[in-house]
Amino acid sequence: MQEMLVVLTTTEKEEDAIKICATLLEKKLAACTQIVGAVKSAYWWEGKIEHASEYLCIIKTTKELYPEVEARIKAEHPYTLPEIIAIPVVAGSKEYLTWITEMLKTSSV
Protein backbone atom coordinates (compact mmCIF):
# COMPACT_ATOMS: atom_id res chain seq x y z
CA MET A 1 0.00 0.00 0.00
CA GLN A 2 1.23 3.50 -0.81
CA GLU A 3 2.36 5.82 1.97
CA MET A 4 -0.51 8.18 2.78
CA LEU A 5 -0.20 11.84 3.73
CA VAL A 6 -2.46 14.50 5.14
CA VAL A 7 -1.44 17.86 3.69
CA LEU A 8 -2.46 21.11 5.38
CA THR A 9 -2.63 24.62 4.00
CA THR A 10 -4.50 27.75 5.06
CA THR A 11 -6.06 30.61 3.09
CA GLU A 12 -7.46 33.99 4.01
CA LYS A 13 -10.60 33.60 1.88
CA GLU A 14 -12.97 30.66 1.70
CA GLU A 15 -13.17 30.92 -2.10
CA ASP A 16 -9.38 30.43 -2.34
CA ALA A 17 -9.64 27.29 -0.20
CA ILE A 18 -12.49 25.99 -2.37
CA LYS A 19 -10.49 26.66 -5.55
CA ILE A 20 -7.35 24.93 -4.28
CA CYS A 21 -9.26 21.87 -3.05
CA ALA A 22 -11.34 21.62 -6.23
CA THR A 23 -8.23 21.77 -8.41
CA LEU A 24 -6.49 19.03 -6.42
CA LEU A 25 -9.56 16.80 -6.71
CA GLU A 26 -10.04 17.48 -10.43
CA LYS A 27 -6.37 16.68 -11.13
CA LYS A 28 -6.62 13.45 -9.07
CA LEU A 29 -3.94 14.74 -6.72
CA ALA A 30 -6.24 14.30 -3.71
CA ALA A 31 -8.79 11.62 -2.90
CA CYS A 32 -10.60 13.78 -0.35
CA THR A 33 -10.41 17.33 0.97
CA GLN A 34 -12.07 19.23 3.77
CA ILE A 35 -12.23 22.94 4.45
CA VAL A 36 -12.50 24.00 8.08
CA GLY A 37 -13.15 27.59 8.92
CA ALA A 38 -12.73 29.97 10.00
CA VAL A 39 -9.85 29.05 12.31
CA LYS A 40 -7.87 31.54 14.37
CA SER A 41 -4.17 31.65 13.47
CA ALA A 42 -1.33 33.37 15.30
CA TYR A 43 2.15 33.51 13.77
CA TRP A 44 5.34 35.50 13.45
CA TRP A 45 5.47 37.67 10.32
CA GLU A 46 8.00 40.40 9.54
CA GLY A 47 9.22 40.67 13.12
CA LYS A 48 5.88 40.72 14.93
CA ILE A 49 3.10 38.41 16.01
CA GLU A 50 0.10 38.51 13.68
CA HIS A 51 -3.42 37.19 14.20
CA ALA A 52 -5.71 36.14 11.37
CA SER A 53 -8.90 34.30 10.60
CA GLU A 54 -8.14 31.64 7.99
CA TYR A 55 -9.62 28.59 6.28
CA LEU A 56 -7.82 25.30 6.85
CA CYS A 57 -7.61 22.85 3.95
CA ILE A 58 -7.13 19.19 4.90
CA ILE A 59 -5.99 17.16 1.90
CA LYS A 60 -5.63 13.35 1.69
CA THR A 61 -3.03 12.17 -0.81
CA THR A 62 0.03 9.95 -1.19
CA LYS A 63 3.72 10.58 -0.66
CA GLU A 64 4.25 9.83 -4.36
CA LEU A 65 1.90 12.68 -5.38
CA TYR A 66 3.15 15.19 -2.77
CA PRO A 67 5.52 17.11 -5.10
CA GLU A 68 2.65 17.75 -7.54
CA VAL A 69 0.28 18.68 -4.69
CA GLU A 70 2.79 21.20 -3.33
CA ALA A 71 3.41 22.69 -6.78
CA ARG A 72 -0.33 23.02 -7.48
CA ILE A 73 -1.01 24.66 -4.10
CA LYS A 74 1.82 27.17 -4.71
CA ALA A 75 0.48 27.92 -8.19
CA GLU A 76 -3.08 28.54 -6.93
CA HIS A 77 -2.32 30.17 -3.56
CA PRO A 78 -2.52 33.95 -3.12
CA TYR A 79 -0.02 34.04 -0.19
CA THR A 80 3.64 34.74 -0.96
CA LEU A 81 4.62 32.12 1.64
CA PRO A 82 1.74 29.67 2.09
CA GLU A 83 1.75 27.08 4.84
CA ILE A 84 2.13 23.70 3.15
CA ILE A 85 2.93 20.81 5.46
CA ALA A 86 2.52 17.07 5.08
CA ILE A 87 1.85 14.68 7.94
CA PRO A 88 2.38 10.94 7.42
CA VAL A 89 -0.62 8.73 8.16
CA VAL A 90 0.79 6.12 10.55
CA ALA A 91 -2.45 4.17 11.00
CA GLY A 92 -6.00 4.17 9.73
CA SER A 93 -8.88 2.05 8.58
CA LYS A 94 -7.58 -0.41 5.99
CA GLU A 95 -10.73 0.12 3.94
CA TYR A 96 -10.38 3.91 3.97
CA LEU A 97 -6.69 3.84 3.09
CA THR A 98 -7.41 1.39 0.26
CA TRP A 99 -10.14 3.74 -0.98
CA ILE A 100 -7.65 6.64 -1.11
CA THR A 101 -5.27 4.51 -3.17
CA GLU A 102 -8.06 3.47 -5.54
CA MET A 103 -9.25 7.05 -6.04
CA LEU A 104 -5.75 8.18 -6.97
CA LYS A 105 -4.97 5.25 -9.31
CA THR A 106 -6.95 6.78 -12.14
CA SER A 107 -4.80 8.90 -14.43
CA SER A 108 -4.92 12.66 -13.98
CA VAL A 109 -7.47 14.76 -15.85
Image (spheres, helix red, strand yellow):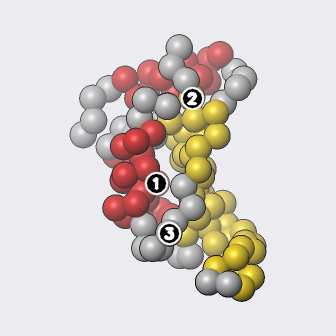
Residue 24 in the image: above or below residue 98: below
Q: Which mark is residue 4?
A: 2
Q: For this view, does 75 lie left or right of residue 8? A: left
Q: Nearer the viewer, mark 1 or mark 2?
A: 2
Q: Measure the C-alpha gap from mark 1 to mark 2.
A: 17 Å
- Residues packed near mark 1 inside 10 Å, few (<14), some (14 to 19) or many (20 plus): many
Q: Nearer the viewer, mark 3 or mark 2?
A: 3
> At x 56% / y 76%, what residue is drawn?
12
Q: For this view, does 38 lie left or right of residue 5? A: right
Q: Position of residue 103 (x, y in %)?
A: 43, 28
- Residues packed near mark 3 inside 10 Å, few (<14), some (14 to 19) or many (20 plus): few
- Mark 3 or mark 1: name the one nearer the start of the chain: 1
Q: Which residue lies under the disc numbered 1? A: 21
- Residue kind at label 2, given as amino acid type: Met
- Mark 1 or mark 2: name the one nearer the start of the chain: 2
SS state under label 3: loop
Q: Nearer the viewer, mark 3 or mark 1?
A: 3
Q: Which mark is residue 81?
A: 3
> At x 59% / y 44%, what residue is drawn?
86
In the image shown, does 43 or 46 lie closer to the viewer? 46
SS state under label 1: helix
Which corner quadrant of the image does residue 29 belong to?
Answer: top left
In the image shown, does 74 or 95 lie closer to the viewer? 74
